[in-house]
């Protein structure tokens, strides 16, 4: 789950209050445009904030941008016989080829 429901509801009702206030202050077409813009911008803001908190897909200058959420470690495997974590075809500890992927 990216964000918790409490934060989402706070932003939802906050954006609703701001959009109603803007519709009361601004003339008809401008208030509607501002309300629609708020309902588009706030979910994007929440999504970016949640992704930055998870540590991926950020707009950092130093991010590599490769792999799943910026992780480019490759696939590691866990041996089903001895539970050893390794890279490659066979387990270096016991020589078994039975493995499962570990992401």
Image (cartoon, rainbow, N blue to C red):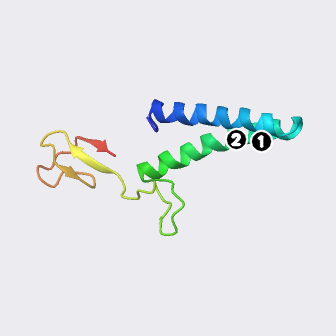
Observer-nearest of 56 and 40: 40
| Number of on-image labels | 2
Q: Residue at x 46, y 38 (%)?
A: 2
Marker disc for residue 34: 1
Q: Is residue 68 visible?
A: no
Indicate left or right for 59 with 80 as reference.
right
Observer-nearest of 36 and 88: 36
Judge the density around disc 2: few (<14), some (14-19), many (≥20) Cα neighbours within 10 Å: some
Q: Which residue is mark 2?
A: 38
Indicate left or right for 99 with 35 as reference.
left
Observer-nearest of 95 and 34: 34
Indicate left or right for 93 with 49 as reference.
left
Q: Residue at x 59, y 33 (%)?
A: 12
User: Whole-percent x and y of residue 6?
Assistant: 46, 31
Q: Look at the picture and state if 38 lies above or below 13.
A: below
Marker disc for residue 56: none
User: Whole-percent x and y of residue 31?
Assistant: 81, 38
Q: Residue at x 53, y 34 (%)?
A: 10
Q: Residue at x 51, y 57 (%)?
A: 58
Residue located farthest toward the bottom when viewing the structure as drawn? 62
User: Which secondary structure, mark 2?
Assistant: helix
Q: Quadrant of residue 40?
A: top right
Judge the density around disc 1: few (<14), some (14-19), many (≥20) Cα neighbours within 10 Å: some
Q: Look at the picture and state if 99 lies above or below 20.
A: below
User: Whole-percent x and y of residue 56?
Assistant: 46, 53
Q: Look at the picture and state if 73 lies above or below 61.
A: above
Quadrant the N terminus occupies = top left
Q: CA distance from mark 2 to mark 1?
A: 6 Å
Q: Are marks 2 and 1 in contact (CB under 8 Å)?
A: yes
User: Whole-percent x and y of residue 45?
Assistant: 59, 46
């Amino acid at each position: 789950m990216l964000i918790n429901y409490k934060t989402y509801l706070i932003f939802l009702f906050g954006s609703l209050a701001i959009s109603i206030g803007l519709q009361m202050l601004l003339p008809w077409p401008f208030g509607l445009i501002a309300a629609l813009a708020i309902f588009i911008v706030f979910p994007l803001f929440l999504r970016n904030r949640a992704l930055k908190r998870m540590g991926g897909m950020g707009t950092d200058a130093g991010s590599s941008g490769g792999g799943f959420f910026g992780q480019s470690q490759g696939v590691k495997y866990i041996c089903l016989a001895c539970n050893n974590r390794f890279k490659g075809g066979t387990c270096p500890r016991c020589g078994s080829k039975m493995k499962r992927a570990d992401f």
